[in-house]
Image (cartoon, grey):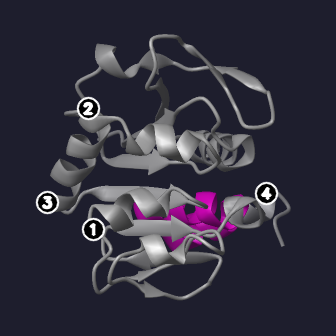
Amino acid sequence: MDKKVYVFLADGFEEVEALTPVDVLRRADINVTTVSISNSLTVTGSHQISVLADALFTDLEFSDADMLVLPGGLPGTHHLNDHKELINLLLEFSAKGKLIGAICAAPLILGQQKLLENKNATCYPGFEDNLINADYTAQPVEVADNIITGQGVGAAMKFALQLVAMFKGDEFTNELAQKMVVS
């Protein structure tokens, strides 16, 4: 069965943290859909790079999703955090133990929803107070049960490869990293 990942984009998203996972997951033949949470398919990142999302949030139902991914960036993270339907989807996914990835500032969304309680987690330095009752590690990437968190732009490749590993295992992921000349 083909795995399905949704990556959520809001104006002000961090381009590297969104597009690196999309690229790496697609290289691994994992089905990825980029989702705009606004009324436009065109989403502009925090560095004024515009991206054409694959779909609008309102046009999807997500019942086929295996993983949800939240890139960081400001104010993109705040826009994601203010999207009530996305928050409800994250809560539903967490309750079912389905995979959720968040990087940079975006783990604050999971932290504020108390989805990181008693779990190791990481985020961009300075946002750790938002990881309510989590065990903040300051590592580039953390995996705690069904939740994968990443620290920031510098960890985007490692984060993306960890997302692949959740579906394809370490051996496949290591071979993919080698092909991509990731050291």
Q: Amino acid at mark 3?
A: Ala
Circle nearer the N terminus (3, 2): 2
Q: CA distance from mark 2 to mark 1?
A: 19 Å
Question: Which disc number belongs to residue 115?
Answer: 1
Magenta residues (range) = 157-176
Q: CA distance from mark 1 to mark 4?
A: 35 Å
Q: Dividing the picture into quarters, in which one does residue 160 lie?
A: bottom right
Per the image, the residue denoted by label 3 is: 95
Q: Is residue 86 left or right of residue 30?
A: left
Between residues 2 and 36, which one lies in front from this camera angle? 36
Circle nearer the N terminus (1, 4): 1
Circle 1: element type = loop
Circle 2: element type = loop
Which is in the foreground here, disc 1 or disc 3? 1
Question: Which disc number belongs to residue 62?
Answer: 2
* Residue 88 place in picture, x, y as percent: 20, 43
Question: Which disc number belongs to residue 179?
Answer: 4
Seen at 68% across and 63% down, the residue is 152
Circle nearer the N terminus (4, 2): 2
Q: Is residue 93 left or right of residue 74?
A: left
